[in-house]
Amino acid sequence: MKKITIIFFLFTLFFLRHVLADFSGTAWEFKSAILGSGMNVSDFVVLDLPTELFSHVNPDLSDLRVVNADGEVPYVAAIERESTNTASVPARMYNLSSRAGETTEFILDLGSGGTLHSSVTIETPSENFRRIVEVQGSDDEAIWRTLNSRGQIFDYTVKDIKPVAVRDTTVSYPEAAYRYLLVRIFDQGEKPLTVRGAAVWRSVSVTARELSYAPTLEISENQEDRATEVILDLGVSGVPHRRGRISTQNSNFSRFVSVYDSNDKKEWRLLRNNYFFVIQTPKFAGSQLDFSYPESNKRYLKLAIANGDDRPIAISGATLFGTVRRILFLYEPGREYHLYFGNKDARRPQYD
């Protein structure tokens, strides 16, 4: 089945014209023309829904209708999602050793050459650390090849009235088939991590296509909570987003951050806790300025960055990301197609 992306213009959206929809009366408020791209045969086509549409459509897309002169045209709506298959690869750890203040390292034996793998998770009960990790591969334990020289792992744990814990101890590398892995943790003068084991994985991922958004920022200091509050405003509600990234020129800091969403800047819902850091020292050099959360379509996102007794960091910008929405339907050349939307009472259509 051939899939073709067609061009979609929202001219009636910008004029906010009301629609007299023959297929169901006046229930739908807006329509927009769907323009083909030189097709001369009937075929199924894929239409990527543009960002401008989401502030006028129901969050679940239940009011979308594709219409031609004969009435409604059946369609299938889909959200692009990652497809990740992760499988554990059996591995035996040995030669765990450390050089005080320098490195902690161990070797993993995967049992036989030819088994594909792409990441290793270090199992440790240690808390509140940041480390650079190097991963090397070998087939004979004599000649080693570097797979990742600058992996980073971290843990941020607070045991308080409101306990929090954010950690990532997995290091990824290009897919490899080496039998042996040498994992070297650079302690750089810090106390060695307590390593209880390690797990090796093979992950095959298909990344979903995303759209990026540049929200406006409203930054203030919450003196009571000793936190910097950054409100990201997308301008309209309805736009789906699920992760972001901040920009800052500051360095040598680490901050716990809570992510909230809202449509009115009054009622805030906690989505997830994250952890920001930028460290540039002889002992450790690394950064983490990305954050993720369950998908939201709220207009506002708030980052509450806990400063404690440290100076606030200067946030210079932020970007949000959301997955592409699309619909699939049968397109016949020579016919006019319109997309109708804007009906809060509409139910999701059911087609064969």
Image: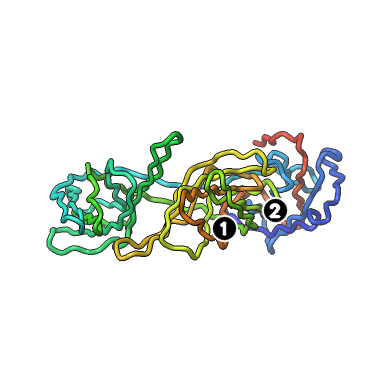
Horizontal arrangement in the rendering, residue 75 relative to residue 174 (left or right):
right
Whether residue 280 is visible here, answered yes or no, is yes
Residue 78 percent location from the top left of the image: 59, 45
Q: Could you say which quadrant of the image residue 85 lies in? A: top left
Colour approach in the figure: rainbow
User: Mark 2: which secondary structure?
Assistant: loop
Residue 76 percent location from the top left of the image: 63, 43
The residue shown at (69%, 60%) is 7
User: Mark 1: which secondary structure?
Assistant: strand
Q: Earlier in the sequence, mark 1 or mark 2?
A: 2
From the viewer's side, name the closer residue of 240 and 265. 265
Horizontal arrangement in the rendering, residue 61 relative to residue 209 (left or right):
right
Horizontal arrangement in the rendering, residue 51 relative to residue 19 (left or right):
left
Up the image or down, 250 lies above or below 127; here it is: below
Q: Assess disc 2: are there few (<14), some (14-19) or many (≥20) residues with their C-alpha within 10 Å of its C-alpha.
A: few
Residue type for callout 2: Gly
Q: Which residue is mark 2?
A: 235
Residue type for callout 1: Thr
Q: How far, Cα to Cα, is label 1 from label 2? A: 14 Å
Whether residue 336 is visible here, answered yes or no, is no
